[in-house]
Amino acid sequence: MYLNNKALSGRTVLLTGASGGIGSVTANTLGNAGCHLIAHYRSDQAAAAVAVQAMPDERVLLLQADLSTAEGARGMWAEALQWRDIDVVVVNAAVLPDTPIDGSDEIWDQGWATALQTNVIGAGALMREAVRHFAARGSGVVVVLSSWAGQQGSRLPDLTAYAASKAAIRNLAQTLARTYAAQGVHIH
């Protein structure tokens, strides 16, 4: 991941899903860029701690939150702002529940509910909080990690809900980018 270290040095970044594969690499990269990092995790605090272990303690806040609800996302945003004002939000956390077309109705329904709650509703609520905050002050950046599956559809038929949820969050990011660009909010 290429980052402009000068642009990030001293800035505060909220990264969701810091304990996962992409999140842990992103956390390390952001730390090396000199930012203050709010590293979100849902349940694996140890993995999140490993992801930021090279950063000085005063530049890191590990923050636990359940992003499967809008309330959880809003609560995390409020708690993060108590530590430092936020300059950048990286929406990375996601779930990939199985939703096999040939599976049971129960598995299908639960998988769709899980994917939409976390990948769209929780992520969307966080993005909403961030863009309103950034628009009020006239600057801020939201980076939304989607997936090739959100653009092309999944090549794995058991990940239908994941693909659809990533397309939805990508579309929300595009809509918010158009709506808030004139107010100094950049969404990628």
Image (tube, rainbow, N blue to C red):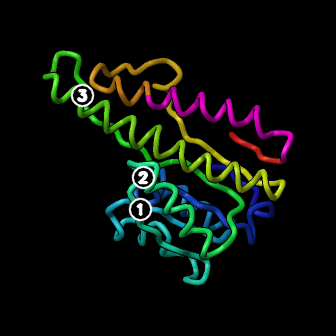
Label 3: few (<14), some (14–19) or many (≥20) C-alpha neighbours in 10 Å: few
Dot 1 and dot 3 residues touching (CB under 8 Å): no
Name the disc covering residue 28, or none: none
Q: Nearer the viewer, residue 154 or 74?
A: 74
In primary-sequence order, the first of circles 3 and 2 is: 2
Name the residue located 53 percent from the left edge and 74 percent from the top edge: 61
Judged from the image, the secondary structure of the residue bearing numbered disc 1 is: loop
Image location of residue 95, percent across then percent down: 36, 42
In primary-sequence order, the first of circles 1 and 3 is: 1
Give the number of callouts: 3
Q: Amino acid at mark 1?
A: Ala
Task: Identify the residue position indicated by label 2 in the image.
Answer: 67
Task: Identify the residue position indicated by label 3 in the image.
Answer: 109
Q: Is residue 55 above or below residue 86?
A: below
Start-end of magenta stretch? 165-183
State how far apart marks 3 and 2 are (Cα): 19 Å
Could you tell whether 180 is left or right of 90 in the image? Answer: right
Q: Amino acid at mark 3?
A: Asp
Could you tell whether 154 is left or right of 6 in the image? Answer: left
Label the magenta part by its dominant secondary structure: helix
Name the residue located 48 percent from the left edge and 54 percent from the top edge: 73
Dot 2 and dot 1 residues touching (CB under 8 Å): yes
